[in-house]
Image (cartoon, rainbow, N blue to C red):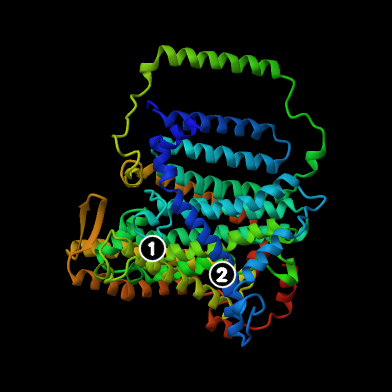
């Protein structure tokens, strides 16, 4: 999709925000700080979804990832108390930094070359019709009907998988004595 | 200076900033004042319920009390505990406040420019942004580096995360009638249908009210604060302005909860006969609409305060079982029943989906359609939810009176097991 006017501004602001947050996330020494940077990354990504006119995905992203997953992360961090590791002067990275830089550089060059040469390999962008930028788009309806028609099977499989995970964790967390007492 | 005017006149800036600026300023000012006066209202209502007078010293009938409180909080010493995690301790109350104030952007206070903005994911936006508020609480409790705030934060965030699910599921019912997530669209749908969704969705309304009470940490669900166990909960170590931020967030959340309930279930600023009093589009119409909305919101807020001084509070395990074993199954059953009733009504030709320029609208074409939907919600929805809850909770001892009467003291062998658990 071709960006126009203020969209460019928003895109670069959000993209750099997400990148800075992501780099800070892996460099953070404290686990809680890392969780906060993760929150920043996810909110920035939700902003990018908004630029793509995927309002429902953006809302669901914040609701599930920021309001659910990050909160659970922080729960776990608090309960296992990782505070002591902060004060230790452990190395954050292994000694293979040079190799990593070479790989990153190679991948960047490869991506740029690929984008320049094979730009037409990317799927054609579908620009939203004029006017929808300000008016209400029907993204939510489309996601909803897709979930009940084309994507119904994968959606159900994913939810079944989650259900199994939930039941499994409950079984693992319960002790035998609890079972006997509360049955 | 010239650059400033170029930016000011840019179409996007003028559309999204300049045109909305007056509304934003007014809404912020009004809501923050209302939040301050809610504390006063709460003290007054509680005083009247307990046959006292409440605040009477500052101004006539103590009306200037919130102002005095605000001044006191602003001039208090700003204490950050020595071993606290400084940066997070500072950020946490800000997260809470921002999360609750951002929601105000999509609350429809009135027609036209009285609403800051209307987005097509309105309800989802509100749920998403207010779920971020939990982070403020949990981080504040953790950053204090003290055991009571940490325990309080764990408790209140567990409570808020559980009741969020019930609230979101309860809102699905009305959305099935409105066929839109936009807050303005929800009001318009109720206007075209002529029936407030509280009549179609009494179960969902009840679930939303109970969930809203728990979500805003209010009595009888005010478990985050327990003087005898965890002192003041997550904000034990906070004082002065930072503590005031948490308080602003809390009382703004109450207003927001009431505003969502008024919009989704009570028709927002719509009232039968409003168009006869004033011509739509005029200033008088907008003013009346905003007043109607305010009356509805304050009626619900008053109920919130009333509940606080009427019901005894829940024990923590009772709170959790109420959330997971009562509200969530009830909300799920409500969705299923609503779907079935709607399909049935469509087959009988009682309701029809009409395409308007604002989107698809569900319209019951004649009074029988409305009557059928109302009767179905009361005669089919309520009994089915009731039976389901009875089946799920037949062995629960806390709310089931019949089981409670049969409770006997554990015998010798069982006693040991209880002691170890």
Left or right: B186 with respect to B312?
left
Q: Residues within 10 Å of mark 1 (few under 14, many from 20)?
A: many
**Residue situated furthest front in the rendering:** B1
Mark toward the viewer: 2 or 1:
2
The chain identifier of the residue carrying mark 1 reads: B
Question: In the image shown, does A61 or B308 lie closer to the viewer?
Answer: B308
Which disc number belongs to residue A182?
A: none
Residue B206 lies in quadrant: bottom left
Q: Quadrant of the C terminus of chain B?
A: bottom right
Report if residue B74 is visible in the image.
yes
On the same chain: label 2 and label 1? Answer: yes
Question: In the image shown, does A31 or B29 lie closer to the viewer?
Answer: B29
Query: What is the secondary structure assignment of the residue under circle 2?
Result: helix
Can you give x and y, in whole percent of width and height, for residue B182 in the image? Answer: 36, 53
Query: What is the secondary structure assignment of the residue under circle 1?
Result: helix
Can you give x and y, in whole percent of width and height, for residue B8 in the image? Answer: 44, 37
In this view, B149 is above or below A111: below
Can you give x and y, in whole percent of width and height, for residue B97 in the image? Answer: 59, 54
In this view, A48 is above or below B153: above
Residue shown at 37%/25% (left/top)?
A2
Residue shown at 57%/37% (left/top)?
A41
**Tags 2 and 1 touching, CB below 8 Å:** no
Q: CA distance from mark 2 to mark 1?
A: 22 Å
In this view, A51 is above or below B340: above
Which residue is labeled 2 in the image?
B38
Which residue is labeled 1 in the image?
B264
Compare marks 2 and 1 and give the one earlier in the sequence. Answer: 2
Question: In the image shown, does B101 or A156 lie closer to the viewer?
Answer: B101
Residue B288 lies in quadrant: bottom left
The chain identifier of the residue carrying mark 2 reads: B
Q: Residues within 10 Å of mark 2 (few under 14, many from 20)?
A: many
Left or right: A15 with respect to B274?
right
């Amino acid at each position: 999709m071709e960006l126009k006017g203020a969209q460019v501004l928003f895109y670069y602001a959000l993209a750099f925000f997400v990148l800075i947050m992501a780099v800070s996330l892996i460099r953070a020494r404290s686990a809680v700080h890392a969780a906060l940077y993760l929150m920043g990354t996810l909110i920035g990504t939700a902003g990018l979804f908004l630029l793509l006119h995927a309002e429902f995905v953006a809302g669901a992203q914040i609701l599930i990832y920021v309001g659910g997953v990050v909160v659970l992360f922080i729960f776990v961090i608090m309960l296992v108390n990782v505070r002591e590791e902060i004060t230790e002067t452990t190395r954050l990275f292994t000694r293979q930094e040079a190799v990593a830089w070479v790989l990153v550089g190679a991948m960047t060059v490869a991506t740029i070359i690929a984008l320049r040469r094979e730009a037409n390999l990317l799927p054609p962008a579908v620009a939203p019709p004029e006017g929808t930028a300000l008016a209400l788009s029907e993204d939510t309806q489309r996601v909803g009907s897709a979930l009940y028609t084309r994507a119904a099977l994968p959606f159900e499989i994913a939810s079944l998988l989650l259900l199994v995970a939930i039941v499994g964790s409950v079984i693992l967390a319960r002790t035998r004595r609890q079972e006997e007492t509360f049955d | 200076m010239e650059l400033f005017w170029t930016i000011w006149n840019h179409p996007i800036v003028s559309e999204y900033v300049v045109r909305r600026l007056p509304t934003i300023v007014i809404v912020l000012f009004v809501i923050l004042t209302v939040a301050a006066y809610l504390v006063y209202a709460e003290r007054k209502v509680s005083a009247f319920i307990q046959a006292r007078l409440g605040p009477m010293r500052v101004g006539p009938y103590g009306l200037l009390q919130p102002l005095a409180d605000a001044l006191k909080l602003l001039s208090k010493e700003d204490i950050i505990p020595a071993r606290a995690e400084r940066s997070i301790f500072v950020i946490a109350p800000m997260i809470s406040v921002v999360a609750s104030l951002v929601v105000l952007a999509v609350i429809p206070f009135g027609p036209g420019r009285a609403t800051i903005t209307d987005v097509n994911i309105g309800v989802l936006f509100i749920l998403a942004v207010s779920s971020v508020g939990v982070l403020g609480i949990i981080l504040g409790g953790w950053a204090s580096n003290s055991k009571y705030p940490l325990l309080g934060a764990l408790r209140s965030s567990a409570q808020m995360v559980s009741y969020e699910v019930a609230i979101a599921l309860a809102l699905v019912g009305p959305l099935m009638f409105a066929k839109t997530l936009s807050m303005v669209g929800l009001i318009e749908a109720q206007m075209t249908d002529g029936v407030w969704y509280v009549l179609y969705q009494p179960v969902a309304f009840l679930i939303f009210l109970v969930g809203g009470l728990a979500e805003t940490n209010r009595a009888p669900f005010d478990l985050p604060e327990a003087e005898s166990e965890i002192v003041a909960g997550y904000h034990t170590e906070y004082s002065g302005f930072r503590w005031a931020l948490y308080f602003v967030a809390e009382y703004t959340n109450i207003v927001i909860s009431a505003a969502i309930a008024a919009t989704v279930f009570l028709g927002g600023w719509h009232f039968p006969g409003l168009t006869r009093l004033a011509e739509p589009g005029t200033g008088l119409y907008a003013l009346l609409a905003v007043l109607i909305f305010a009356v509805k919101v304050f009626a619900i807020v008053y109920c919130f305060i009333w509940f606080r001084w009427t019901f005894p509070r829940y024990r923590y395990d009772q709170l959790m079982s109420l959330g997971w074993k009562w509200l969530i199954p009830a909300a799920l059953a409500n969705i299923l029943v609503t779907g079935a009733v709607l399909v049935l009504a469509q087959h009988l030709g009682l309701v029809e989906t009409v395409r308007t320029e604002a989107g698809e609208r569900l319209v019951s074409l004649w009074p029988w359609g409305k009557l059928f939907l109302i009767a179905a919600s009361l005669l089919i929805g309520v009994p089915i939810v009731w039976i389901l809850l009875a089946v799920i909770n037949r062995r629960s001892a806390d709310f089931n009176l019949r089981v409670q009467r049969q409770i006997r003291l554990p015998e010798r062998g069982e006693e040991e097991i209880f002691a170890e658990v």
